[in-house]
């Protein structure tokens, strides 16, 4: 079977593929997605590589003892991430093909799966848009503009027994680590996550610490790789030229990300910390070195907001940085080390770019927007619908005027009284969850999500609770602050990826250990991503916000969760010209 025939057989309906002809001796293929085209070449045949799916190679036995086995054996190719929204959305094109069904016997994890490739085949369903997604869900109306948006990615989780150990799934990967940054009481183990009865299941349970890294609880965190569309290492086609699909013009686009969730446990017992959220691709959740000086910044100005503690070097100014801040830290506003990849970075220093025409860098970071973080209070289960920010306003007070804040149902949602601390500023709406959609109630699924437009002008975030718009923040709400001498913070512009986890920590909620029931499971019926059909922009490595080369350069910081700071990773901080009197 030819390379072209294989791709034609595997592409989703939204894609088309045609041969453009030859350039010199290289075959060139053209892929079309919603009207945008990329050209891929050269052909592996020109390199002497086999293009027959049944052909063997010398090292096949190392990673694919059965070349016709389950598609789950295909390796990951996307860098990092849990999928992207406006960009943590752009997934690798891993197409489906039929092969020999692997047995699930002998698996020791949830659903009879393990990390050796003993996983059920997901025949015919590895496209960006899940074949099980109902046709009526292919479009939806924007909460903000009323315009029609199109589906660009979905996962319905309808195939039971999926494994999320690294390399086992084309979209998602579970982590194997202790989430020490928030003093969690659990170890995240890939074996705690599977699919069952049409939903993704993340289970937390009480275990013997001897078998669990000296921790009493075991749970799961899974992330979806950035939606980065590329022709990958597929059935012997060793083609590693990464080609994210981009719009012809550089611009940030709108994104809507809904997820249907059953919350774990009960709506009357506090302690569990379920979350579905997103982070900029230059930071890796749970990997401290990658986050050092990156989270939760969303900043593209060169001023005191990029500096440690938000103070000018050698001074105690501005005064707002040292008073009326965190009451548990003597009123100090910020303990952040400064923005590592700021717009103040000196030319020639390590920075992912891009660079402006004046020679300055675009400020880069790892911002966070949360779909939900769930908690339980005296009047029932609630969800925090929030975003995290840096640098900070004076006293963490953002401009929540009527122009910048809209709460759609004030009987259901209020602004969270928690506004931030020395490590983050928070804009959060605290909203009553659907009290039936809990594991120990009716187990219905409630739709949570957010819609947003990145940037400054007319930008916004609107959060969704139980399928309805709950509250919105406009970009001007995070405008400049004369007291702390900082500039406006954009609605996050970075390529983002999706994370789902079931945490357990004294940092978030009061633990009612006497009443909590274990095991407990958070279930997700589907995850979907939408964008306006006239402004698609999906990919983890866009030209205007590149990430891949930087992550490759500092791979250890993104792969070793035991490294807690950038310095511990053996790397110097890039020089910031404000630390040297304004010059480099």
Image: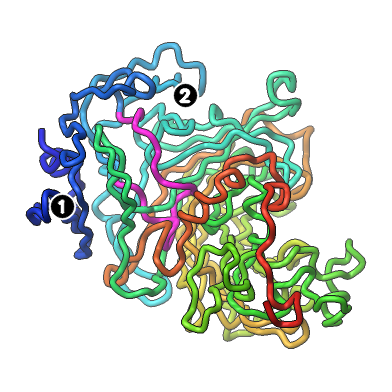
Of 477 and 405, the residue lying toward us: 477
Q: Report x, y in % for residue 560.
A: 62, 40
**Quick check: 496 left or right of 37?**
right
Closer mark to the observer between disc 2 and disc 1? 1
**Boundaries of the magenta span:** 71-93
The residue tagged 2 is 115
Residue 81 highlighted magenta (yes or no): yes
Residue 209: x and y in percent read: 74, 22
Q: What is the quadrant of the C terminus in the image? A: bottom right
Q: Label 2 crowding class (10 Å Cα cut-off): few <14, some 14-19, many 20+?
A: some
For label 1, the crowd category at 10 Å Cα-Cα, with few meaning under 14, some 14 to 19 and many 20 or more, is many
SS category of the residue bearing label 1:
strand
Magenta residues: mostly which secondary structure?
loop
The one of 155 and 71 positioned closer to us in this rendering: 71
Q: Which residue is mark 1?
A: 29
Secondary element under disc 2, as helix, strand or loop, is loop
Distance (Cα) linking label 2 and label 1: 34 Å
Q: Is residue 332 left or right of residue 19?
A: right
């Amino acid at each position: 079977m030819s390379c072209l025939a294989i791709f034609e057989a595997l592409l989703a309906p939204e894609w088309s593929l045609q041969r453009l002809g030859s350039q010199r001796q290289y075959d060139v293929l053209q892929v079309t997605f919603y009207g945008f085209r990329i050209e891929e070449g050269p052909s592996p045949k020109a390199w002497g590589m086999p293009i027959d799916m049944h052909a063997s190679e010398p090292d096949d036995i190392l990673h694919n003892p059965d070349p016709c086995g389950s598609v789950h054996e295909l390796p990951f190719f996307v860098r990092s991430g849990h999928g992207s929204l406006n960009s943590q959305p752009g997934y690798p094109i891993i197409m489906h093909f039929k092969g020999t069904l692997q047995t699930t016997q002998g698996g020791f994890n949830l659903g009879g799966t393990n990390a050796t490739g003993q996983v059920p085949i997901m025949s015919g369903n590895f496209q960006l848009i899940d074949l099980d997604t109902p046709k009526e869900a292919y479009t939806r109306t924007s909460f903000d503009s009323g315009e029609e948006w199109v589906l660009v990615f979905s996962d319905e989780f309808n195939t039971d027994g999926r494994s999320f150990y690294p390399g086992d799934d084309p979209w998602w990967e579970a982590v194997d680590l202790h989430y020490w940054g928030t003093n969690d009481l659990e170890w995240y183990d890939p074996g705690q996550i599977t699919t069952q009865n049409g939903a993704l299941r993340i289970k937390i349970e009480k275990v013997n610490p001897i078998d669990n890294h000296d921790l009493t609880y075991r749970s799961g965190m899974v992330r979806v790789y950035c939606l980065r569309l590329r022709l990958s290492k597929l059935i012997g086609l060793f083609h590693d030229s990464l080609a994210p699909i981009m719009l012809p013009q550089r611009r940030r686009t709108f994104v809507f990300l809904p997820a249907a969730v059953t919350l774990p446990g009960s709506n009357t017992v506090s302690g569990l910390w379920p979350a579905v959220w997103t982070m900029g691709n230059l930071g890796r959740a749970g990997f401290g070195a990658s986050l050092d000086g990156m989270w939760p910044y969303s900043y593209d100005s060169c001023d005191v907001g990029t500096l440690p503690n938000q103070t000018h070097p050698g001074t105690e100014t501005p005064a707002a940085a040292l008073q009326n801040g965190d009451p548990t830290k003597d009123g100090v506003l910020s303990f952040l080390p400064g923005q590592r990849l700021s717009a103040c970075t000196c030319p020639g220093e390590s920075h992912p770019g891009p660079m402006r025409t004046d020679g300055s860098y675009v400020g880069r970071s790892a911002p966070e927007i949360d779909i939900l973080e769930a908690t339980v209070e005296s009047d029932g289960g609630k969800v925090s619908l929030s975003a995290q920010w840096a640098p900070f306003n004076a006293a963490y007070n953002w401009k929540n005027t009527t122009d910048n804040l809209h709460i759609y149902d004030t009987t259901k949602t209020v602004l969270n009284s928690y506004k931030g601390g020395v490590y983050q500023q928070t804009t959060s709406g605290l909203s009553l969850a659907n009290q039936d959609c809990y594991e120990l109630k009716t187990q219905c699924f409630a739709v949570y999500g957010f819609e947003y437009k990145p940037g400054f002008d007319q930008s916004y975030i609107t959060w969704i609770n139980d399928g309805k718009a709950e509250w919105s923040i406009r970009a001007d709400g995070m405008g400049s602050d004369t007291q702390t001498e900082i500039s406006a913070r954009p609605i996050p512009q970075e390529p983002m990826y999706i994370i789902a986890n079931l945490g357990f920590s004294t940092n978030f909620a009061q633990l009612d250990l006497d009443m909590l029931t274990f095991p407990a499971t958070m279930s997700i019926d589907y995850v979907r991503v939408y964008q306006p059909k006239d402004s698609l922009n999906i990919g983890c490595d866009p030209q205007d916000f590149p990430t891949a080369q930087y992550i490759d350069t500092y791979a250890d910081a993104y792969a070793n969760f035991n490294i807690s700071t950038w310095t511990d990773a053996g790397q110097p901080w890039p020089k910031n010209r404000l630390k040297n009197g304004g010059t480099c």
